[in-house]
Amino acid sequence: MLAAERYDRIVELVNIKGSMRVSELSERCRVTEETIRRDLDRLEEAGRLRRSHGGAVSVREEQPEIPYRIRETTHAVEKKRIADAALALIVPGDRILLDASTTAGYMAANMPDMPLTVLTNSIQVATELSSRDNIEVISTGGQLAARSLSFVGPLAERSLETYHVDKLFLSCKGVHLESGSISESNELQARLKQKMVGTADQVILLADASKFGLRAFARVTGLDTVHTVITDQPLSEEQISLCSAYHLLIRTV
């Protein structure tokens, strides 16, 4: 591999994963760690990545969040079917966590008024549930992300450390079966959802078919932490085979 080809390969690998260690790049590119360190210095000088302790991180800009009101009308029919199927998994007395996805918003809009505790970082979800007498709503608080009508940031992340829930319902930007990961376009959302996963006994992923095969900028978690996926179209045989490796329960609606 020529040096120029190796530079391109290094940048590609770092952009895909967000960050990589020298030892990983050395193995992937089949050169010594000393060579990789020199390569990283040159690539940082060229502005193609940023050095970090023991490796490098991507400098690719995050994709801006699509405003909630636009996302709300995208694949709306499919999202509503997924939301209805998710509601069927809730029983009285549950403690649940809803993210700030539009699918979670549809769940809140149709949620029956039964004894529940609902923790959320979504302004839309909290507003929808405000008229339910039997549902206790807890907001994470935090930094307002206006485009997604949600709370994010360190305060929201610390708030989640206070709670434990039975079920987490979350969506994402991309579900990439080959790498076994789900991802978000925005790092703040991804970090908060990582915290969410750690608070729940069950993680239920709400993902319409358009999300499969996508790998967005910021990794949320591995599919091995997800218990159930609710989607709107049957998966291919290859996708089913990949899902079986993660012991995922697939529900198609």
Image: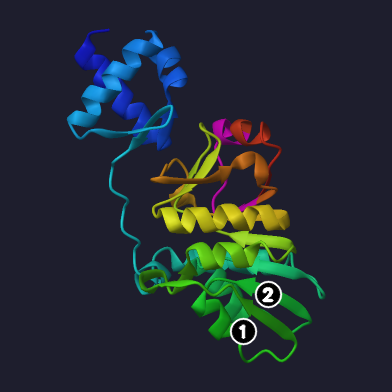
Magenta-highlighted residues: 229-240
Q: Is residue 233 magenta?
A: yes
The relative height of residue 165 versus residue 50 in the rendered view (above or below) is: below
Q: Is residue 53 left or right of residue 85?
A: left
For badge 2, the amino acid type reads Val
Give the percent coordinates (x, y) of residue 203.
Answer: 68, 54
For badge 1, the amino acid type reads Leu
Q: Please identify the quadrant where the N terminus is shown.
A: top left
Q: Which residue is denoted by mark 1 in the rendering?
A: 129
Q: Which residue is denoted by mark 2 in the rendering?
A: 118
Label 2, secondary structure: give it.
strand
**Proximity of marks 2 and 1: CB atoms separated by less than 8 Å:** yes
Label 1, secondary structure: give it.
helix
The relative height of residue 29 versus residue 223 in the rendered view (above or below) is: above
Q: Nearer the viewer, residue 19 or 243?
A: 19
Can residue 231 be seen here? The reply is no
Estimate how packed mark 1 is, as few (under 14), some (14 to 19) or many (20 or more) residues with alpha carbons within 10 Å: many
The relative height of residue 176 versus residue 152 in the rendered view (above or below) is: above
Q: Report the number of numbered marks.
A: 2
Residue pictured at 55% horizontal, 71% vertical: 121
Say which quarter of the image contains residue 199. Answer: bottom right
Which numbered marker is on residue 43? Answer: none
Estimate how packed mark 2 is, as few (under 14), some (14 to 19) or many (20 or more) residues with alpha carbons within 10 Å: many
Q: Nearer the viewer, residue 49 or 179?
A: 49
